[in-house]
Image (cartoon, rainbow, N blue to C red):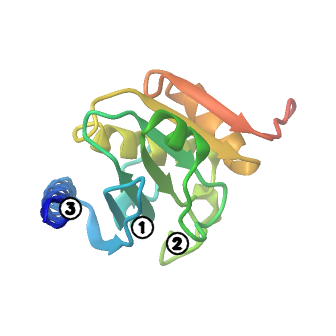
Amino acid sequence: SDVYKRQILNCQQKASQKELLQEQLKNLGFQNITSLAADSIFQVRLQCYIEQPLDHFQKSIKTFPQRLTISHVGYDRPVVLITEGYSMRKNYLQELAQMLNANQVRMEYRYFGESVPDTLDWKYLTIEQASEDYHRLRQLLGKIYPGPWLVTGWSKGGQTALIYYYHHPKDVQAVVAYDAPLNHSQ
């Protein structure tokens, strides 16, 4: 029947989109790419890791794996980057991604969850280093997703989104910070 043929075609398109995206990510240096359950919004959902410099400013050889998820709608769609303030728990649909029919990228904050260096040198757990993590991710994924990018987060993640934008204002077109605390003194 026609319904069955459409279902098969839809499955084939999702499979080819997933394979293409996985190959593109591998070519950019992303590792341990695994598939997550797709849903009615995202055609493809992946979890992967990117090796980040422990110190972006000294370009040391020390790195750590930073975990992220990519929920893909289409290459021609905007991207909503979610700056997690801590570790990533379950994957979810962020309201901006749904409203804009956008791709969604979530990245775990350095030194939290699975994004932990072998040696915990706390001097590298700074907002400047975290901003550089997001900037590097944006540069890499911008090769796959050239459209507009938005950054968002909640609480410490919202604070992270604002600080990332402060350091790299040309990376994103908008910031939506939910319940973000801001310290006005040092």
Is 87 displayed left or right of 73 in the figure?
right
Residue 152 numbered mark, or none: none
Residue 44 place in picture, x, y as percent:
31, 60
Circle 3 sits on which residue? 3
- Disc 3 residue type (three-letter): Val
Q: Give how far apart the Cα atoms at labels 1 and 2 are.
A: 6 Å
Say which element carries label 1.
strand
Mark with earlier residue (1, 2) = 1
Q: Which residue is mark 1?
A: 64
Q: Spatial distance from mark 3 to mark 1, Cα to Cα?
A: 47 Å
Q: Quadrant of residue 147?
A: top left
Is tag 3's residue or tag 2's residue first in the polypeptide sequence?
A: 3
Q: In the image, what residue type sits under mark 1?
A: Phe
Please provide percent x and percent y for residue 109. Answer: 57, 58
Residue at 66 percent of width and 55 percent of height: 85
Q: Quadrant of residue 127?
A: top right
Judge the density around disc 1: few (<14), some (14-19), many (≥20) Cα neighbours within 10 Å.
some
Quarter holding residue 128 = top right
